[in-house]
Amino acid sequence: MSNLSLPKEPNTAVTGCLDSRYPEVYSSSFAAEGAFHTPMPIQTTSKIWHNGNLIPWEDANIHVMSHVIHYGSSVFEGIRCYGQPVGSAVFRLPEHMQRLIDSAKIYRMELRYTLDELCAAVVDVIEANGVAPCYIRPIALRGYGEIGVSPKGSPIEVYIANFPWGKYIAGHGGADVCVSSWNRLAPNTMPALAKAGANYMNSQLIRMEAEINGYQEGIALDVNGLVSEGSGENIFVVRNGVIYTPPLSNSALSGITRDSVLTLARHLGLTVIEQAFPREMLYIADEVFFSGTAAEVSPIRSIDRIVIGDGKVGEITKTIADEFFGIANGLKPDRFGWLTPVRVNASEPVGA
Ligand code: PMP
């Protein structure tokens, strides 16, 4: 067993995120002391794109009686724009906007904008604000119209904001995470392939439980007890040189970064298998890492206080992360055509 300093050394059996040593936390609020939480204040910019126009940041408001407020009716995206040796570039912009269109289609939301128009809107708002590197948040929501559950009478509003954002998963040597007591969305309940705002009520339960117990993130199992994904990340494990990730049928979001990792791994000649696997595979893996737009490629150091491998960032994780960041930052050739240039000179990454 490694002598790494893991969060709150156990004096009871390992129980995943739920830990009976902190019973008071469960009857208390998320504000309980001892919760691991990295503040992520929103840094405002000048403009937000709204239904085809750039409007002042402070005017991008909706009414409290909007459909989305009551029924969670939104679909959204999270995208990153990276600094390049010259200018900046959005990572996999068309893929993200296609997923927005797909999410909207699942929920019968008519966006009225083509893929090209949505991609151009993202470039427009970044260039108007002159902020890069940045995180981009497009959202389509059902607005103010009617109060019933049926969304038909509520107009669809599309907004795109961008703002500086640094690292999402803290911990340079890898994150300390847990397996959540909450399961991911069961098939045919909330569609996991749609990146819908309402799905993030489930993500919030996973993330809050993890933070309250001193972990950086939670990993959720699917409704059958098989590994699914993090609250906002896909997951990969490495064992005996082979990379595994759960298939989308384990209620995982079709992550754009997940696809990038699969592509990079295959091009590096690594064996990568999309395969369902049980929770205990996490504990005996040589390496485990998260992938996601916010999380990028984030190594995991321990799960439920069990050290992964030797507790150091593994070779395969490192190789994939180097490729990923090399391409994203324009330091390696963009051989898969993943970058969309924007005319903004990058400042230093914020918080990275
Ligand atoms: N799963 C969930 C639940 C997420 O919220 C995210 C972030 N969008 C991901 C996976 C990773 O997806 P992507 O790589 O496209 O950001």
Image: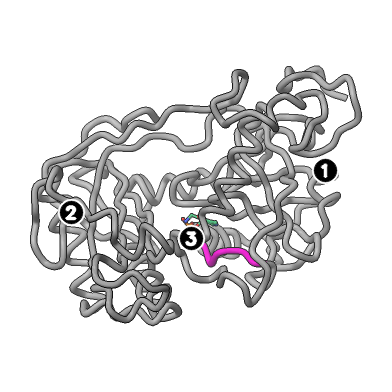
Q: Which residue is labeled 3 in the image?
A: 198
Residue 261 visible, this orientation: yes
| Residue 350 spot, x, y in % from top left | 32, 30
Residue at the location (44% across, 59% down)? Answer: 197
Q: Which residues are magenta?
A: 251-255
Identified by mark 1, the residue type is Tyr
318 on left or right of 2:
left
Q: Residues within 10 Å of mark 2 (few under 14, many from 20)?
A: many
Q: Which residue is labeled 2 in the image?
A: 342
124 on left or right of 99:
left
Distance in Å between CA atoms under marks 3 and 2: 31 Å
Q: Which residue is labeled 1 in the image?
A: 283
Q: Residues within 10 Å of mark 3 (few under 14, many from 20)?
A: some
Which is in the foreground here, disc 1 or disc 2? 1
| Residue 234 spot, x, y in % from top left | 59, 55
- Quadrant into which the C terminus falls: top left
**Ligand 1 within 8 A of label 3's CB?**
no
Distance in Å between CA atoms under marks 1 and 2: 42 Å
Principal secondary structure, stretch drawn in magenta: loop
252 magenta-colored:
yes
Q: Secondary structure at mark 1?
A: helix
Give 54 or 201, whichever is nearer the viewer.
201
Q: Earlier in the sequence, mark 3 or mark 2?
A: 3
Image colouring:
one colour
Give 262 or 249, whichever is nearer the viewer.
249
Q: Secondary structure at mark 2?
A: strand
